[in-house]
Image: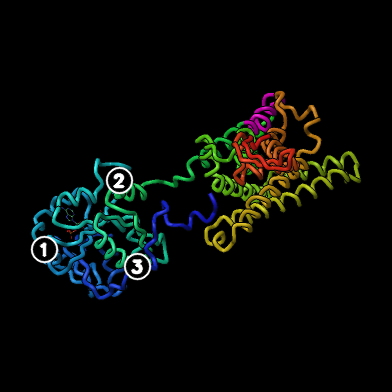
Amino acid sequence: MSGGDMAKPLLGHQSMEGDPSITPAAGRTIGVLGSGDFARSLAIRLVCSGFKVVVGSRNPKRKAGLFPSAAEVTFQADAVKKTDVIFVAVFREHYSTLCDLADVLVGKILVDVSNNTEINHHKESNAEYLASLFPACTVVKGFNMVSAWTLQSGARDGNKQVLICSNNQEAKRTVAEIAQVMGFTPVDMGCMSSACEIENIPLRLLPAWKIPIFLALGLFLCFFTYNLIRQVIHPYIREQKNKLYKIPIEVVNTTLPCVAYVMLSLVYLPGVLAACSQLYYGTKYRRFPDWLDQWLQHRKQIGLLSFFCAALHAVYSLCLPMRRSHRYQLIETAVKQAVEKKMNIWVEEEVWRMEIYISVGIIALGLLSLLAITSLPSIANSLNWREFSFIQSTLGFIALVISTLHTLTYGWSRAFDENQYKFYLPPTYTLTLLVPCTVILAKVIFSLPCIQQRLLRIRRGWEKGRYVKFVLPSATGEYSSGETSSNV
Ligand code: NAP
């Protein structure tokens, strides 16, 4: 999924913004049934947008003080008579109590703004239920994704999209017109059968983030346990040393870069698998398996979580010298050296390793920040496709290579030191290298001219085993035609 996807109207439906057939409707009278939070915010927004507002309440005297003075607060039946467009700001459970108004509602447009508490809570959507109670009215579903807060603070704050659906085009157009005057972006979601989908959207919690978050948590848990065994449990069992103090910072800080690094490689691994599949089957027209499709679609979120972990790792690392345990260790080492009368403790190789390791880490974090920033819809929209793919694909891969250098300079020769194998467990950094190095190796292989050419041809539509017409000159100089496989 490209970064620009988030800026597009949800579900790819048609935005009605800028539709020349939509004309300003300010000045028109709009009715609101109900006097709760939503009704109040809606009335304020409508008044600010130049509409006349009439609010229908069961108890207008008590509720009038809650509304702006420009809005008229009256009894439900009275309010309904004064307007053709009525927002029903009442919960579904109370729709049936409005049935007494059926006669005065004939021919009016009812806007159903309601939400449910659970996905697919009822057999039919709230809007369809309202339509079944008032068959002589035209029902339009809309505004349910806009919160009372967004309405009050204006469309600058929060989601600007208002998804609208109805079986009546004219009524839908009228509501879209009102939304546009209020500063929202109406999005046509088609006919009333979409109401269920529109009602489910506000109930979904970060749908695109679920898999990446579980993946990050899973990796964190695995690496955390592994580091805990090596850094805390091993010294306790082998030397009876209590190293529990390491858990909040040191163990977490050795876990975070592992998660960040592996997650970054998981952004590029599905691309490698997709290329392998295309090379194997010799076509780009074969559907990827569902799991690979899903994985490809979640790359942006996986990348952002990788950046998040890397940023946390940077902050944790900066805080390491602030710890009291670190100060005690420094003093202890200094005292030991003084006792042993050691004057020069400078180890040239260690100094260089550390300088390179930190510098490379900073560059990797800088590149990851760039990738994260350019995945924001507003920034992604300002880039053309070439620029976007250069940053996300080429610079992203460079970030992976630099992160590998960071990991290697951190680990240095520890993989060859047998003291580093706690309970026969190799140092953590060697495990983290597995997936990223596979990705880098695969990318290097794909860049070999013979493979790159074949992949390029496949991506331009060439297929293995597809028969093409050919024309050959005969011995007599005449041309004969036939068919052969393009694979030959
Ligand atoms: P609320 O504060 O509880 O207000 C509901 C209103 O419904 C009451 O003030 C009441 O006004 C009216 N009502 C009419 N008949 C009723 C009855 N028989 N029993 C109880 N109340 C009755 O709720 P709300 O937050 O404004 O939400 C209203 C609708 O907007 C809901 O369908 C909700 O899903 C939808 N919505 C709300 C938000 C939000 O941010 N709050 C966002 C999107 C959608 P009177 O006493 O004056 O008649």
Q: Amino acid at mark 1?
A: Ala
SS under mark 2: loop
Query: Which comes before the other along the chain, label 1 or label 2?
Result: 1
Q: Nearer the viewer, residue 270 or 464?
A: 464
What amino acid does circle 2 point to?
Thr
Q: Is residue 259 visible?
A: no
Ligand 1: give its quadrant.
bottom left
Q: Nearer the viewer, residue 480 or 429?
A: 480
Task: Identify the residue shown where x is 35% and y is 62%.
Answer: 186
Q: Would you say 358 lies left or right of 100 here?
A: right
Residue 237 in magenta? yes
Magenta span of residues: 226-240
Report which residue position mark 1 lands on.
77
Q: Mark 3 or 2, which is nearer the eye?
A: 3
Q: Which mark is residue 180?
A: 3
State whether residue 19 appears in this view: yes
- Which of these two is toward me, 117 or 221? 117
